């Protein structure tokens, strides 16, 4: 079968690889019908995350059940299913407490510490540190622990309408949910990429009174206005923090969400420490979120970071009495409820798709998405 494989930074290929097979009774094999490229894939593409050996990329995918292991009874061959990006066992302490990304059983690198050596649970297509699972940017994929998480999807919902339930909409939803809005809050979202726009959509649904999207690219701000009905700030044209304060009687937003992560533009100092391998990327976006939020407010970080960052302003966190929330998407928890929002047309997710390409064009898809060419916001690949 064909699969998207990354060998080293910028070297993504569509290759012929062996077909996956059932290895355990809880496995299933999916014939992938749609898969997407995520900002998280770009961290490998841009050399910010380690590629110890070639990785079969892809953690946002759905498809048709091809074969099931003997423990799988909730779906059968031929069913259309969504596969959450996070692999949980469904039984351990964390899976039982709504925290499957911290599953103790799905990653041989699991550990309580949360560093390079001790990670959380398994994730598709994110390499050795995340359990070494082959990803879904492929014709077929083995889905382990499929009893927990994989759900059937109604035939009246098109792939595109539900695909983003496998990662980015639940990610944006969780970013807002962690802030426990009471209604009427001002929510400022740094980043109007696919994840930031999903957070903006989720903010309205959870009762925000005002939603502000911040980015450094005009076309992404236009797309945030169109798809999430947000007010926008261009962070290269104005000082975004000052603008947020100006819009909120000098206080700052009640909630700031960081949907940028480590790929924000680096300061000179950060470039130096990155060059010496002492830091992965930048925490500029997180720092702006901490400045842009009001005293006593909540910063919710869904942008991904890795390792230690020396310029984190802990003093500001204390002085402003901020609450900092973060973490990977808590999928598969909540997947059915969020699917209902799509089924009931309370939210539209497919309006962020700007490019649909055959899987064989994945290399081109990565380049367009990474380089922000051709007003690209989200690329869907069709095997
Ligand atoms: N927590 C999770 O479970 C989870 C899930 C999916 C993705 N993510 C992470 O979310 C982040 C965003 O993903 P994406 O797919 O939207 O990626 P993306 O690269 O398409 O979007 C990032 C956006 O941030 C903008 N940006 C860069 N610097 C900025 C700055 N200083 N201020 C404001 N905007 C700035 C970019 O122009 C871009 O539009 C990534 O770090 C990704 O790894 C996390
Ligand atoms: Zn993703
Ligand atoms: Zn578990």
Image (cartoon, rainbow, N blue to C red):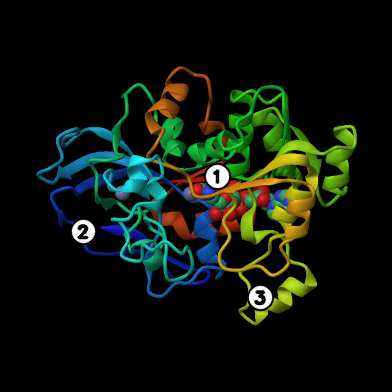
Residues packed near mark 1 inside 10 Å, few (<14), some (14 to 19) or many (20 plus): many
Quadrant in which the N terminus appears:
bottom left
Left or right: residue 225 compared with residue 98: right
Look at discs 2 and 3 and give the one toward the viewer. Answer: 3
| Of 165 and 2, the residue lying toward us | 165
Q: Is residue 81 above or below residue 41?
A: above
Q: Which mark is residue 378?
A: 1
The structure residue drawn at horizontal position 56% and vertical position 64%, both measured from the top left corner, is 306
Determine crowd level at label 2: few under 14, some 14-19, many 20+ residues with C-alpha closer than 10 A.
some
Q: To which residue does mark 2 refer?
A: 19
Residue 174 image offset from top left, x and y in percent: 53, 38
Q: Nearer the viewer, residue 192 or 112?
A: 112
- The answer to whether the residue bearing label 2 lies less than 8 angstroms from the nearest atom of ligand 2 is no
Q: Nearer the viewer, residue 4 or 231?
A: 231
Instruction: Establish whether ligand 1 lies closer than 8 Å to the Cβ of label 1.
Output: yes
Q: Residue at x 45, y 30 (%)?
A: 161
Q: Identify the image quadrant of residue 153.
A: top left
Name the residue rendered at 41%, 44% in the picture.
Answer: 99
Instruction: Looking at the image, tell me whether mark 2 or mark 3 is earlier in sequence order.
Output: 2
Residue at disc 3, secondary structure: helix
Q: Nearer the viewer, residue 135 or 316?
A: 316
Mark 1 and mark 3 in contact (Cβ < 8 Å)?
no
Q: Can I make out residue 88 in this image?
A: no
- Image side of residue 128 versus residue 16, left or right: right
User: Pointer 3: residues within 10 angstroms few (<14), some, or many (20+)?
Assistant: some
Q: Disc 3 or 1, which lies upstream in sequence?
A: 3
| Distance of label 2 from label 1 (alpha carbons) | 27 Å
Residue bearing mark 3: 274
The quarter holding residue 21 reads bottom left
């Amino acid at each position: 079968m064909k699969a998207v494989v990354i060998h080293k930074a910028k070297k993504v290929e569509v290759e012929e690889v062996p077909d996956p097979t059932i290895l355990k009774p809880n496995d299933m094999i999916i014939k992938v019908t749609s898969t997407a490229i995520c900002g998280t894939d770009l961290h490998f593409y841009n050399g910010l995350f380690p590629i110890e050996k070639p990785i079969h990329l892809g953690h946002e995918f759905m498809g048709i059940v091809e074969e099931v292991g003997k423990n799988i009874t909730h779906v059968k061959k031929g069913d259309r299913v969504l596969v959450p990006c996070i692999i949980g066992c469904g039984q351990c302490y964390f899976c039982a407490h709504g925290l499957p990304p911290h599953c103790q059983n799905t990653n041989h690198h699991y550990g309580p510490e949360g560093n390079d050596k001790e990670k959380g649970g398994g994730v598709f297509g994110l390499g050795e540190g995340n359990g070494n699972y082959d990803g879904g940017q492929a014709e077929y994929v083995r889905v382990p622990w499929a009893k927990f998480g994989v759900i059937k999807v109604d035939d009246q919902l098109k792939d595109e309408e539900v695909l983003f339930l496998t990662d980015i909409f639940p990610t944006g939803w969780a970013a807002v949910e962690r802030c426990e809005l009471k209604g009427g809050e001002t929510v400022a979202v740094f980043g109007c990429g696919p994840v930031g726009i999903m957070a903006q959509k989720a903010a309205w649904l959870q009762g925000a009174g005002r939603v502000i999207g911040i980015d450094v690219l005009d076309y992404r701000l236009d797309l945030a206005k169109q798809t999430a009905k947000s007010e926008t700030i261009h962070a290269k044209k104005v000082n975004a923090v000052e603008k947020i304060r100006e819009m909120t009687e000098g206080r700052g937003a009640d909630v700031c969400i960081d949907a940028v992560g480590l790929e924000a533009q680096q300061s000179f100092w950060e470039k130096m420490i990155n060059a010496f391998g002492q830091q992965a990327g930048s925490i500029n976006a997180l720092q702006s979120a901490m400045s842009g939020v009001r005293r006593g407010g909540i910063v919710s970080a869904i942008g991904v970071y890795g390792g230690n960052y020396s310029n984190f302003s802990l003093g500001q966190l204390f002085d402003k009495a901020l609450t900092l929330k973060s973490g990977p998407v808590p999928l598969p928890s909540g997947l059915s409820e969020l699917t209902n929002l799509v089924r009931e047309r309370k939210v539209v997710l497919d309006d962020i798709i700007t490019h649909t390409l055959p899987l064989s064009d994945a290399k081109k898809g990565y380049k367009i998405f990474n380089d922000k060419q051709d007003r690209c916001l989200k690329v869907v690949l069709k095997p």
